[in-house]
Amino acid sequence: MGVFVLALTVFVVGFWPWVAPSVSRQLSDLTEQVPEAFQGVCAQVGDFPWMERLLDNLPPARLMSDGGAVATTAVFATFGALGTFILILFIGLYGAADPGRYREGFLMLIAPPGRARAEEVLDNAAGTLRGWLTAQLISMSVVGVLTWAGLWLLGIPLALVLGLIAALLAFIPNIGPVLAAVPALLLAVSQGWSTVFWVGTVYVGVQTLESYVITPLVQLEKVSLPPLLVIGFQMLFGVLFGVLFGILGLMLATPTAALTMSLTRDLYVEDWLERRQDQAKK
Amino acid sequence: MSRLSISVAVVSVAVTWMFVFAPDVILTLFAGVLLALLLRGGGG
């Protein structure tokens, strides 16, 4: 924790003042240029009536034609998201400062004979989540740097902020990389269809490298998650419970899958199924 | 019914209640716990 706070302070004091103006300027440019690029795409596909009908039904087209209402919703959503972010930050900081107190408090809710096992199960779950998080942060950083480098080499404007978006959205497997590619592809349209192709190639290349090389390398065997389980949880959290959980649910679908896998292995398979089998043998 | 079963039932009911009636709360808590685990790093 001390090392983290020190690193954060060094980053904020030394590095952030240098990067922040650039990121802020690029973010503001991106919010202006993406809608313009979208309008450009609309103008270019005007020759194809079926494409026009398709674009009319896309959410961005609806959002942009709805002006004021969208702005109000965005303001409320931003404050809601900011509040949630601050809450998460406080829970994280207090939890990291004195985890023993909360751990003991939770264990006190378990009857004394089961406390030792509950502690073991908690340790396994924390280990799985910590391993997954570390692997995820490494692959997010690699995705961000590679995307930035690829787009910079292609001469795409706002490569830094697009790389940052790619890194952040890499937290959401399967869906995140697709969402991250959209603004870059829209910006590439203004430079011609061959640039769109190369930008697409950068995103597909980075995604392939991340899925088949980086993630398997950084994930230990105990935290590697079966892809179908992850997609299943994303569908459950994003689609079925989308109204209830929203974007936070989609972001937390994978760690929830990791937690569920660890708890199922310890509590259902080991403590229930295998113990019953042992008892039957005796 | 053993005390262990009762305590497991109480925790399960509490978690299920939060999932159904306050999903935002449980997700925010979970995200906070993830952040705490990350901040603690290898120190556990």
Image: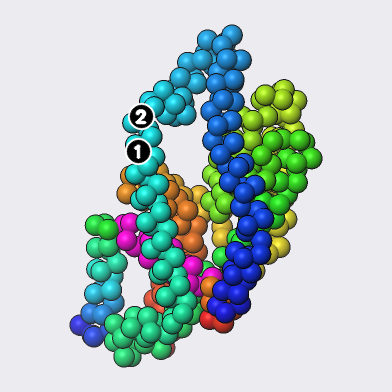
Tell me the subunit letter for badge 1: A
Q: Position of residue A62 (x, y in %)?
A: 41, 25
The residue wearing badge 1 is: A73
Tell me the subunit letter for badge 2: A
The answer to whether B39 appears left or right of A148 in the picture is left
Please name the residue shown 59% across and 20% down the image.
A40
Q: Nearer the viewer, residue A127 or A231?
A: A127
Please name the residue shown 58% across and 46% down the image.
A24
A53 in relation to A180, above or below: above
Dots 2 and 1 on the same chain = yes
Colour logic: rainbow
Q: Which residues are magenta?
A: B23-38
Q: Position of residue A44 (x, y in %)?
A: 61, 15
For the residues carrying marks 2 and 1, which lies nearer the camera in this image?
A: 2
The residue wearing badge 2 is: A68
B28 within the magenta span: yes
Looking at the rendered structure, the kind of residue marked 2 is: Gly
Please name the residue shown 44% across and 81% down the image.
A99
Q: Nearer the viewer, residue A24 or A238?
A: A24
Distance from disc 2 to disc 1, alpha carbons, whole Å, reads 9 Å
Looking at the rendered structure, the kind of residue marked 1 is: Thr
The numbered mark, 2 or 1, whose residue comes first in the sequence reads 2
A214 in relation to A278, above or below: above
